[in-house]
Amino acid sequence: MALSSAPNRLPSRAGIWPLLAHARVDELIAGHLRAPRCAIIGPAGSGKTVLLRLLAAPLQGDGDAETGAAASVRFVDDAHLLDDDRVDELSALLDDPSTGLILATRPWPRSERLRKLMRRLEQAAPPIVLGHLDTRDVTAALAAAGRPIGAGCVSSLVHLCGSVTWLLIAALAAHGDDPCADPAHEQVSQAVAELVAERLQTVEPDVAEVVRRASLGWRASGRTAAIGAGTGDDAALAHAEGLLMRNGDPIPVVRAAVLRTTPVAQMMSLLDDESAPPPAADVVASLGDVTDPRLARVLLSYADAVAGGDVARAMDLYDAARMAGADPLEIAVRTSRMAWDRGEVDDAAAFLDALSIPTDHPAHDRAVDLVGAVWSARGYLEVSAATYAAHVLRDQVVRAHAAIAALGAGDAGPLQQTVTAPRSSPDVPTTLSVAVRVLLRGLAATVATPPAGALDDLVRASEIYGESGEDGPIPELPAVLAALTALNAGDLDAALAVLGDALMADHGGAWARPRLLLWTAWVFVQMRRPEEAAARLTEVDGSAMPLSARDVLLRDGVHLAFVRRFGAAGELRPLWHRVRDDVRRVEPDLFALHVLGEFLIVSGLLGDAERLDPVLATSRALLQRLGDPPLWAAPLHWATLQRAVIIEDVTAAQDIAGILADMAPHGRVAAAMSAAATEAMRIWHGTVNVDQVEAASAGLAAVGFAWEGARLAQRAAVQASGWRAIARLTALARELHPGVAPEMAEAPQPKVMRQSGLLSPRELEVAALVVSGKTYAEIGETIFISPRTAEHHIARIRRRLGATSRTDLIEKLRAIVDSSDADDGDATERRIG
């Protein structure tokens, strides 16, 4: 490269160097220093030697303008190779102000003496740093050389070569000046890769190893710590050789060369390392169609490592492992588990559906567990239980899951067998094994009469399960089982506490959170805390985690319960039409009876009771197979009683009241429900004992059924005679559940009808509400009947009274109103007394 005509100047574009380097060169030459001093720093191939030669003539030609004395300038190349004695000699030169020193070196290695020497040079002039070019630098050099390479190609080549000078020079040469016919620059990459492969053969083996590892994804650590840390590490040497970026990242074209030229055996040795990161897709592809057990094992472990965060990459690695010879069932179990963790229940099933599960396979129990849990999540606990029962299970945790599924389907046999079976192994218990043992013991107690110790055991089991960190598939979460038991025992505080603790402990993992939130919302509804319930529902609706069919049903039930208690009168029917078919997509199970009970009640209120007849029949059959355990059966029987009253099925209501009476001695919830059922039947037949209704309503509220207690008091108030009785019962209803009947506090109170003999007790009840101005829907809401049933009652009343219009009906009803409050009060007192 020729010098310009001016003896003390280099051409402004003499070499493909950074523009800043050109500026530093210009400053150094234009400074007319008698003893110029400067360091030139750059990795191999950055042009340090060329620059030294170009600087020699102008700098050695400088002299003192007054004396004419020639300058004494030393030019030193490859200073990083000098020993300490030689570095000391150069340092001594700097003590003479008349001696200049231009020193070129790689960034590594750098001894302590060389570092001090570089420091002294930097005090004289900023260093000239070479080796990394950006698009502007290359474009300027090409323009100076008259080379017509387009801007798009320049940018692509700069990226391909990681801005490294020697690689860019080679890439530009391989590219040529002809119009580019290879926009991806594959041919350029291949040409440069051959140079890289040859360079890797000539550098130190440890440096080449670092380059290969970096190209496979290793980040510099330990022996290959961050460059510039002063440790003399091989990553810094690799950068100095122009084979790695300064921060240790691989250069794209170097990485491509490593993948293209490294032998398969060597590649597998690099991958078969515990510290190796999961390989990218192109790393796996570089291995070709290699079938090797070691490679399959390595790829499986890599896939497992990324399964929680990068699903697409994990699937690619699992597919590669399959191609390398990994066991298909093992891969299916892992991909199914990955789908389960994401809440993708159908995907989890799809991975295993087409495969047989041999009994002697190492993944047998895990595969069966996944299939069984998937059927549970889909809402088919009977199929889940059958899946477990069809296999010989060795793992005690999986056997526990089988017992849970069987119980949910109405079969306590596997549970009893597991609880009473002697331990088959003297192994030291794990946190998880203790959790499931205590869980099964508690579940077994729930189906006994009385259920002694059930809740305590289940709460303990939930806590231990959370501490185990287990997040795998299970037919039902221990925290949910404990919360259900607490609800069935009338202890809402315990139910809320166990669910709250489970959420704090990430009980069951990410897939379990929506289910825990939904049950928490259910408890908040029961506790008359609508704001907290709504917040949980909002969190579930905003979650990216999909809901299984069983969780969809639970969400529907919570919404129905919420709207029925706290929503506006017109909200319930459209909601019902949106969710009513979801109950047909799952089979009733023991753990969904609370939710199914809500569906039963709403179906009756809205004149759609027949839709739920199959659900009711299946649920009652399930309970009968378990012996109708009071702890589980009482809430469903109570919901069924309410449905029977709403649809005016006298026979069913009397039968259920009798069942609850039989259960009353065996639990406080059953006893409260039995007392309430007795009063409900009396109210239905026109008899209201205020004291007994108050006691029954308060009893329901005490076991977590405050809404039901309030409605009982409200219905009694409608049927009662005398304003004192009505006032007492209305006040109780508002106290138990403030939102139960706002109309009773603000609207005119229903009149008390005379017992004229023309109307039945229920018709008198309806007539009183008609006189009060209520609509069909409001009458239905008030006395637990459907609007259609209310309409039928009013039609019969009109026929019996001979009314020709609604106005005529109202007048005739008013004609039989007992308007004497005093007389009504006396009559009520006599009836109560």
Image: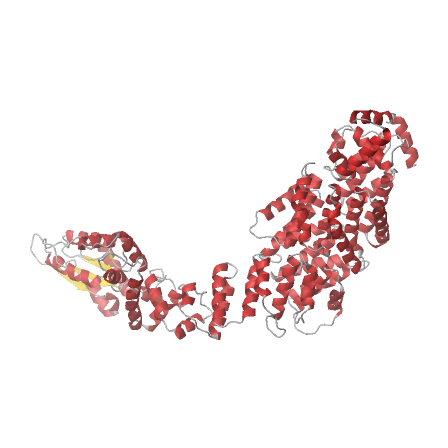
Image point 77% across, 28% down: which residue? 748
Q: Is residue 660 above or below residue 688?
A: below
Which color mode does the image show? secondary structure
State left or right for residue 648 relative to residue 237. Answer: right
Q: Is residue 714 visible?
A: yes
Image label count: 0
- Specify whether 229 is left or right of 777: left
Q: Nearer the viewer, residue 825 or 118?
A: 825
Whole-percent x, y for residue 641 in the image: 80, 47
**Which quadrant does the C terminus fall into?**
top right
Quick one: 96 or 225, which is closer to the camera?
A: 225
Res. 728 visible in picture: no
How far from the left and from the top, in percent, is residue 793? 81, 35
- Residue 25: x, y in percent? 19, 54
- Judged left or right of residue 324, residue 823 is right
Residue name at image x 69 percent, y 48 percent: 523
Q: Quadrant of residue 772?
A: top right
The x and y percentages for residue 530 are: 67, 41
Q: Nearer the viewer, residue 143 or 185?
A: 185
- Residue 401 appears in which quarter of the rendering? bottom right
Split into 4 quadrants, where in the image is the N terminus? bottom left
What is the quadrant of residue 107 in the picture? bottom left
